[in-house]
Amino acid sequence: MASEHEAQPAAQPSAQVLVASNRGPVSYVLGEDGSLDARRGGGGLVSGLSAVEDKLWVCAALGDGDREAVRRGVGEPGVRMLDIDADVHADAYNGIANSVLWFVHHMLYQTPLEPVFDAEFRRQWASFETCNRAFAEALAEEAGRGAAVLVQDYHLALVPGMLRALRPDLRIGHFSHTPWAPVDYFRLLPDDIAEQLLRGILGADRAAFLTRRWADAFTDCCTRIVGGTGRTEVGVHGLGADADFLRRRAHEADVDERMAALREQTGPGRRTIVRVDRTELSKNIVRGLLAYRALLDDRPEWRERVVHVAFAYPSRQDLAVYRDYTDEVRRVADEINAVHGTAGWTPVVLHVKDDFARSLAAYRLADVALVNPIRDGMNLVAKEIPVVSDHGCALVLSREAGAYEELGGDAVVVNPYDVSATAAALHEALTMAEDERAARTERLAAAAVALPPQQWFLDQLDALRRN
């Protein structure tokens, strides 16, 4: 439950547009001297809300700095941060959202051994309910009469139904940033939990998804499990890249410096295959490395002529399975370099420390972009690289990425599990004629920016108000 120290709402609720998300637009770092340093984030929601007045962002305090800020009454205008008990939040976030719901929607379970829904799962599920209830209560307290509330993602799937019970006057939307599992996989969940999740989202006037495929999967689950979607409209909003920001940022001095460093690492005249991902299990980094190894094994003409620039930034390292996966990424990259590397050529240039400027430098340098997730809600990297590329970039794209719906016609499409076919796709991309690559890049970039972040958010808001 929310702490007694949580910042209190205004006496007269007035916000007309509210967003709820686990992570907010600002976070706080607690210094050794007791000082608090505010760090502001970006992204589509931040950009979209900048154009809206009478707005409020409700989010969770995610660390010691955030919780201390709430206790001191430190905060940003238009942001309400909830100081939910740290253990309760950890159970909800790591125990349920990231270790159950994420795995279901990305179809990641090794089903002979997992999942196991036992008493520990039920204990953590109670924490998930508690967190969602804290959000619903805060939104109910803050929202003005008839306000629009946009609830974000699987972490808060129960909020719409809880909020509807508290404030039937509100216009409530829910947006899923992940895929949605097909019904047979979704039914791995205990029957009551599957129904509770669906009914939670169906408390919204409008449930929206990144692609038609995920929207249809949700509708199918509702039809099969609870008898339909009822009064809830199901919509699609395919988040696009922020072209103006990316192009401006990609030509700042620190990006130029990192381009020079990357060129030195790859060596003169060599082609580059670039991937930029978090070390999520769903991103399929290991199979991408195996496909590159197969390319070098099967087509020796590429040895010393191509470098795989692989950025695999750590994610969820508090979970053992993610730490193990990160270790496996390093192991396979080291193995490729040990087997194929020469005194003047490092086949895989692997970076695991997050560096946005370096990512943009790689975007600009890429001859081939490798985006091969097992399953992905959208995958903005697939959209960002064609927008930023200096000289045109061939895109090797998994058919299981949400971006496939918009970009598949101009990408080299792969089955993410087929390492041999992915190696062949890399060869096709590397040998693509320059004029064809340029033409494809131009079409990919146009599709990628069709719904930039601010418009993506405002379209959802308009659709909710019309509902």
Image: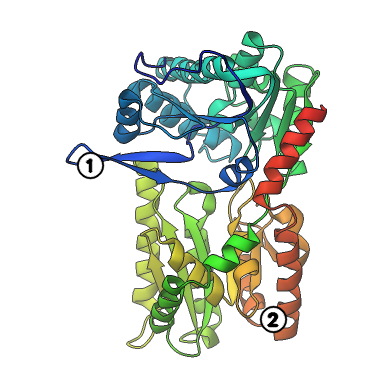
As drawn, the residue found furthest toward the left would be: 33
Q: Residues within 10 Å of mark 2 (few under 14, many from 20)?
A: some
User: How far from the left and from the top, in percent, is residue 351?
Assistant: 38, 65
Query: What residue do we see at 22% from left, 42% from top?
Result: 31
Q: What percent of the width, then of the height, locates residue 432?
A: 69, 81
- Residue 220, image quadrant: top right
Q: Which mark is residue 409?
A: none
Q: Earlier in the sequence, mark 2 or mark 1?
A: 1
- Above or below residue 349? Residue 204 is above
Residue type at the position of mark 1:
Gly
Where is residue 412? Give x, y as percent.
70, 68
Report the residue marked by disc 2: 432
Vertical order, 22 against 408 (above or below): above
Residue 95 in the figure: left or right of residue 5: right
Residue position for label 1: 31
- The quarter in which the C terminus is drawn is top right
Separation of residues labelled 2 and 1 (CA atoms): 52 Å
For the question of whether residue 400 can be seen, the reply is no
The answer to whether mark 2 and mark 1 are in CB contact below 8 A is no
Q: Nearer the viewer, mark 2 or mark 1?
A: 1
Residue found at the very far top of the displayed protein: 165
- Based on the displayed image, in which of its 4 quarters is residue 15 positioned? top right
Residue at 53 percent of width and 52 percent of height: 283
* Residue drawn where x is 74% and y is 72% of the image: 442
User: How far from the left and from the top, in percent, is residue 394?
Assistant: 66, 73
